Amino acid sequence: MILSLGITPKNYAPLVAAAANDTDAQAFIDAAGITDATQQSAVNQLVLDLKSANIWNKMKAIYPIVGGTASLHKWNLKDPQDTNAAYRLSFSTGWTHASTGMTPSNAFADTFLIPNVSLTSNSNHFSIYTRTNQTTNAVPLGSYTDSNRLNQLNISTGTGLVYYTGPTSTELLSTLTDSKGFFIGTTRANNDRKTFRNGVEQKSLTTLVNTNYSTFKMYVGARNTAGSAANYTVQQIGFASIGDGLTDTEASNFYTAVQNYQTTLGRNV
């Protein structure tokens, strides 16, 4: 016998579980201790976009620089372990950290990544997202052994955009009237090198130049010049990466992914 209690059923919306984050994004979020929902979403979408564009596997180090403190900015998205071997950043004194990025004042961050150990022969890229202008010559990402072994990006309105990937004869130089944005220098072969600003090609080099990589660790915020920091930048930095060479399409998609990431965080330029 069924008893009626005189209760009219209500229409309840079914419970829908929130979509889980990408496992690599979640590993980074957990390691860094990112608790802000917007920041978590931005990191997750960045990882999804890089994977969709077939860029993720080309990365050795990705620094999303999210969270506003040194303890949060140090992590490598590609391998979020707190070890030198995982290329997490180690900061010198002189950095200012904020939700918009990190700004050096005669300061550098050690990536522990040595180009001639970690990068593929005649295939590399260096990228950096700068949120403020630089007027004098500076190297926000670089390493230098000698004139035959240097890997760096120079970015300033005074000097321009300069990319080196081996000897000085690999120099790609283009002028800049604005040194803010997302900059990439990439080598795809020993006769195929290009630079990009905000996804747009700036300079190319097709001269055959065999590449020897630097034997010193890459620095962010300055150049590691045979073991000593030099050519400091004062630009606020919102993203950086090091990895293998990128095609033109990958460089364009990389900019789109990074710009969307910065836009979600409310700090795009």
Image (spheres, rainbow, N blue to C red):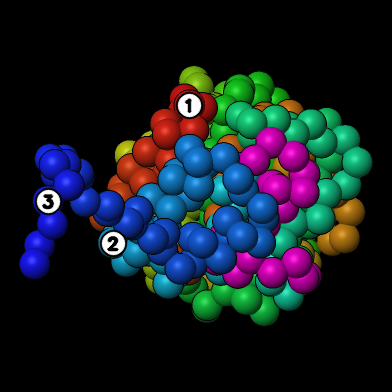
The amino acid sitting under disc 1 is: Gly
Instruction: For the residues labelled 1 and 3, say whether their Cβ atoms are less than 8 Å apart.
Output: no
Secondary structure at badge 3 equals: loop
The amino acid sitting under disc 3 is: Ser
Q: Which residue is mark 1?
A: 266
Q: Is residue 229 left or right of residue 185?
A: right
Secondary structure at badge 2 equals: helix
State the image coordinates of residue 211 (x, y, percent, origin top left).
56, 72
State the image coordinates of residue 242 (x, y, percent, origin top left).
56, 60
Magenta stretch, residue numbers: 66-84
Instruction: For the residues labelled 1 and 2, say whether their Cβ atoms are less than 8 Å apart.
Output: no
State the image coordinates of residue 143 (x, y, percent, origin top left).
72, 58
Q: Residues within 10 Å of mark 2 (few under 14, many from 20)?
A: few
Q: Which residue is mark 3?
A: 4
Q: CA distance from mark 1 to mark 2?
A: 23 Å
Asked if the stretch drawn in magenta spans residue 201, the answer is no
Indicate which disc, 2 or 3, sits on the residue closer to the N terminus: 3
Q: Which residue is mark 2?
A: 52
Q: Nearer the viewer, residue 204 or 113?
A: 113
Quadrant of the image for the N terminus?
A: bottom left
Q: CA distance from mark 2 to mark 3?
A: 55 Å
Q: Nearer the viewer, residue 250 or 186?
A: 250
